[in-house]
């Protein structure tokens, strides 16, 4: 079969590939600690589950508007406004089946041959994959460990050209857990306004912060009309399998994004949208409890990794990942990740899966129990001692 040329430009998300290999080892009786998948190990709050069941029983099982039900968009706008200090118009919000479609639709709508998009490196790999799939050129901006995995703003300015149409940011960040400071956000806004560039801001980890404050580019003067704000329910409410996300768009983009939804999935399931209304309106006490536990896990895994010779680990301010430096071990990130899985039974991701600047690092998710983290640390220590 002769596929379209653009299919050769489409990448993948290696977490699911590593998960499949880890499951194959488990099927052979090998004990594996899973640090590869980035999803909270907490149950979805019961009030949300009950709301979904009630919605099904009430008949919310048919087609609905492609943009998302007005009730949910109004609640999203209210939540965004209260947390970011600016007013969000519900008519500029589009609800999607997961947050990934916001990346997909935004890139398809704005980028084409000859365009450039600047993206953080390392970054969630689907961004670079989709930029290349669109025919545009992906321009990486390194996130440097010595800056706490923040961008060098002067370096960012040097990457901007007349072909730059989009800058993509993620804070708190996957895979590093890095967080952009207010001065970074302010400088980025100036660059975007001066050069008439749209910023796609991935804020799915906005509630998972341990120190400091999370700043949104949409809150900066002049940026509400040139920001695509991506968010969802998966991380905050432990709803990864529910597949529900949303985006806030410049007004002139909304009709085009809705048309892409109509052409691809028609609409997000209405009973899940009703459950998301309850997620936003209902008790929020599960969030600080989850974040408090994540912080304990973060400190446990960071302290443990820093005790292993040849490994050093920055302490992230947000999300639920660590990005340890393994350069002193003398192996590539791919080889050490494979070695760790096959010889130690610890499933991790190579930093290079998130971009060229991820070489020399691993991504470990600590969205697992403290018991599993302790077990993983012992396994890693044993493997490293044998190198």
Image (cartoon, grey):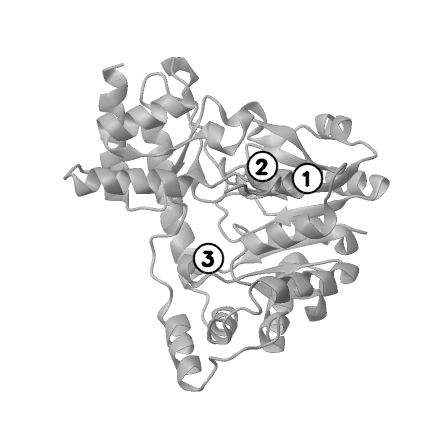
- Percent from the top left, x then y, of residue 54? 40, 82
Circles 2 and 1 in contact, beta carbons < 8 Å = yes
Kindly state the secondary structure of the residue where label 2 is placed. Answer: helix
Q: Give the camera-side residue of 361 and 180.
A: 361
Which sits earlier in the primary sequence, circle 2 or circle 1? 2
Location of mark 2 (residue): 9
Q: Which residue is mark 1?
A: 135
For the question of whether residue 209 can be seen, the reply is yes
**Earlier-in-chain disc, 3 versus 1:** 1
Would residue 326 be found to the left or right of residue 277 on screen?
left
* Residue 127 falls in image quadrant: top right
Q: Secondary structure at mark 3?
A: loop
Q: Could you tell me how far apart the alpha carbons at marks 3 and 1 are, in whole angstroms? A: 29 Å
Q: State which tag comes first along the sequence, 2 or 3.
A: 2
Q: Residue at label 3? A: 234
What's the CA distance linking mark 2 and mark 1? 8 Å
**Which residue is rendered at x = 70% and y = 38% of the image?**
136
| Residue 359 position (above or below residue 290) | above
The residue most toward the front is: 1
**Residue 298: image x %, image y %?**
39, 39
Q: In the rendered view, tell whether residue 318 sits above or below residue 86.
A: above
């Amino acid at each position: 079969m002769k596929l379209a040329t653009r299919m050769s430009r489409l990448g993948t998300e290696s977490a699911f590939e590593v998960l499949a290999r880890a499951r194959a080892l488990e099927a052979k009786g090998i004990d594996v600690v899973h640090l590869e998948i980035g999803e909270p190990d907490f149950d979805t709050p019961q009030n949300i589950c009950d709301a979904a069941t009630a919605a099904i029983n009430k008949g919310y099982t048919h087609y609905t508007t492609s943009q998302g039900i007005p009730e949910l968009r109004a609640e999203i706008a209210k939540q965004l406004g209260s947390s970011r200090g600016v007013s969000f118009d519900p008519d500029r919000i589009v609800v999607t089946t997961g947050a990934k479609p916001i990346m997909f639709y935004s890139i398809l709508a704005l980028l084409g041959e000859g365009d450039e998009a600047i993206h953080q490196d390392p970054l969630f790999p689907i961004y670079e994959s989709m930029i290349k799939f669109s025919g545009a050129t992906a321009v990486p901006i390194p996130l440097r460990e010595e800056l706490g995995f923040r961008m060098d703003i002067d370096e960012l300015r040097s990457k901007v050209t007349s072909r730059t149409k989009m800058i993509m940011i993620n804070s708190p960040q996957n895979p590093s857990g890095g967080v952009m400071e207010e001065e970074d956000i302010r400088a980025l806004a100036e660059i975007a306004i001066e050069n008439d560039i749209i910023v796609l801001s991935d804020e799915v980890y906005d509630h998972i912060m341990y120190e400091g404050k999370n700043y949104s580019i949409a809150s900066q003067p002049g940026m509400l009309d040139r920001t695509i704000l991506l968010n969802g329910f998966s991380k905050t409410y432990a709803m990864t399998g529910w597949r529900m996300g949303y985006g806030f768009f410049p007004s002139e983009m909304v009709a085009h994004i809705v048309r892409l939804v109509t052409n691809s999935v028609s609409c997000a399931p209405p009973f899940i949208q009703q459950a998301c209304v309850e997620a936003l309106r209902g008790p929020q006490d599960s969030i600080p409890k989850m974040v408090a536990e994540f912080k304990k896990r973060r400190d446990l895994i960071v302290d443990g990794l820093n005790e292993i010779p040849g490994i050093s680990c920055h302490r992230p301010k947000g999300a639920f990942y660590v990005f340890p430096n393994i350069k002193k071990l003398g192996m590539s990130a791919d080889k050490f990740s494979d070695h760790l899985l096959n010889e130690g039974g610890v499933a991790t991701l190579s930093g290079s899966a998130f971009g060229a600047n991820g070489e020399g690092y691993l991504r470990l998710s600590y969205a697992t129990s403290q018991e599993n983290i302790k077990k993983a640390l012992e396994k890693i220590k044993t493997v490293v001692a044998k190198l």
